[in-house]
Image (cartoon, grey):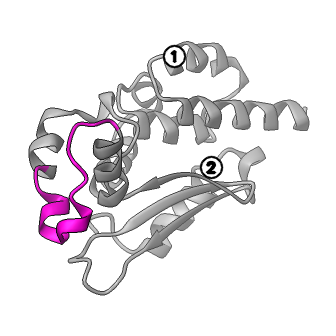
Amino acid sequence: MVLGSWSGMRKYLEKDMLAEDMKGRVRYGCTSYKGMDGCHIFEIIIDGRQIKRFSWETVNTWFIEKSLKRDNALTGTAAYWDGFWELMDSVPVSERTEYTDSEFCKALEKYRSQRIGESIVSDDPIVFMFACLDRRTGRRTYPRLAKAAEKHPQWVRDIIDIRFKGEDDHE
């Protein structure tokens, strides 16, 4: 993982950057299994409900569900992954609703290295998600976020709704 230790990153995500009204409600998870060749499964959980999972598997499943590739699961692991990289190259993040662990890490790096104003208008739904949950993003920014969210998948719009309903409850 290029972002340093997961425990440090989790502290950053859940404590340092998170909006006050979301603290204790948002949890990020990272799982890796033997034989995964350094790949991880990241997830975001809000109020005890998994909102999004980031892994190669979720992306490959999405490709199959969208009929962009055949489900070769019954013919073996190699066949199941056949064509995956070609599809990754041809279907950009902004056109998908599922993302890999490396895309999660790249988005987090980008979010951390740019101003919040840039993240709020990002075409990358993961960068945009981080900006929506950021402590620097407040009530006055909500109209801009809601408008920008129109170009993002439903899962991102759900996070905005959760975030700003939470703010309403705390006012």
Q: Quadrant of residue 36?
A: bottom left
Answer left or right for 76 relative to 170: left
Q: Residue at x 50, y 17 (%)?
A: 148
Q: What label does residue 92 carry, if any?
A: none
Is residue 68 rendered magenta in the image? yes
**Label 1 amino acid?**
Glu
Residue 146 drawn at (x, y percent): 60, 18
Give the mark nearest the N terminus, 2 or 1.
2
Q: Amino acid at mark 2?
A: Leu
> Left or right: 17 with respect to 63?
right
Q: Residue at x 29, y 58 (%)?
A: 56
Callout 1: helix, strand or loop? loop
Instruction: Report how far apart the C-alphas of labels 2 and 1 lie in the structure.
Output: 23 Å
State the extent of the magenta-drawn residues as a range: 66-83
Provide residue 53's location: percent of width, then percent of height: 47, 55
Helix, strand or loop for disc 2: loop
Residue 1 sits in which quadrant? bottom left
| The C terminus lies in quadrant | top right
Q: Which residue is mark 2?
A: 18
Say above or below: 144 vs 105. Answer: above
Q: Is residue 33 left or right of residue 132?
A: left
Return the x and y of residue 31 as percentages of the image width and height.
44, 74
* Whole-percent x, y for residue 45 in the image: 62, 57
The residue wearing badge 1 is 150
Q: Residues within 10 Å of mark 2 (few under 14, many from 20)?
A: many
